[in-house]
Amino acid sequence: MPIHPYLNYKHEFGVGVYIAPGVQIVGRAIFGDHVSIWHNSVVRADVNFIRIGENTNVQDLSMLHVTERNSLTIGKNVSIGHSVVMHGCTVGDSCLIGMGAIILDGAVIGENCVVAAGTVVPPGKTYPPGSMIMGNPAKLTRPLTEEERVGYGNHYKSYVGYKDQYLKQASS
């Protein structure tokens, strides 16, 4: 697993973390319990820190980065789709970030939100909890229904299961 030190910064892994082949991790990356980072993603915490909450998954080919001014914080129970770019932003608990979404510096996504596939969230924008966010530039299109909040908010569970299967296979 390629982990690259940067200055004196070190990464921290919780229990049950899975890092897939091809992932690159740099600097101050803090992973909660049962986090999974999937194939060929980059977690580049060189000039600030990245914190990823428990049970969160970062799917294949995603890029997580920071600025000197903006760290990157991702809550617990979050699913981040394939080829997502997250740059110096904050994402609350139980969110679903769709494939190919881009979330830029200083943006804040409240808990229990969906950022639709292909959405571009401009720098500094804030969205309240329970929002459906879509478009380029991103717009709050409507509040999520309770059924959607529960459904999307539980999406992470499948990836915790996949992660456990990969870890079990690796230890056999």
Image (tube, helix red, strand yellow):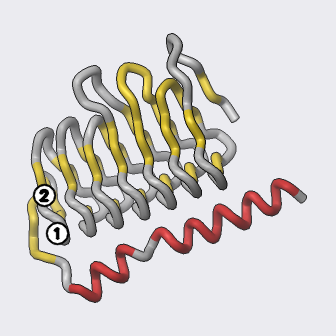
Mark carried by residue 127: 2
Mark carried by residue 131: 1
Residue 136 image point, x, y percent: 15, 54
Neighbor class of circle 2 (other Cα within 10 Å; few <14, some 14-19, many 20+) is: some
Residue 22 image point, x, y percent: 64, 39
Q: In which quarter of the view is residue 122 placed? A: top left
Residue 135 as seen in the image, left or right of residue 61: left
Q: Nearer the viewer, residue 25 or 60?
A: 25
Residue 163 as seen in the image, left or right of residue 126: right
Identify the element where label 1 is drawn.
Answer: strand
Q: Nearer the viewer, residue 6 or 22?
A: 6
Vertical side of 147 occupied by 57: above or below: above
> In percent of the image, x 18 and y 44: which residue is there?
107
Q: How many marks do you count on the picture?
A: 2
> In percent of the image, x 66 and y 30: which residue is there?
2
Residue 79 image point, x, y percent: 42, 62
- Give the residue type that dot 1 points to: Ser
Q: Nearer the viewer, residue 140 or 168?
A: 168
Mark 2 and mark 1 in contact? Answer it, CB < 8 Å.
Answer: yes
Which residue is outermost to the right? Answer: 172
Estimate the spatial distance between the alpha carbons at disc 2 and disc 1, rounded to whole Å: 7 Å
Identify the element where label 2 is drawn.
Answer: strand
Residue 60 image point, x, y percent: 53, 52
Q: Nearer the viewer, residue 113 or 61?
A: 113
Neighbor class of circle 1 (other Cα within 10 Å; few <14, some 14-19, many 20+) is: many
- Give the residue type that dot 2 points to: Tyr
Q: In which quarter of the view is residue 135 placed? A: bottom left
Q: Quadrant of the C terminus?
A: bottom right
> In percent of the image, x 55 and y 73: which residue is there?
158
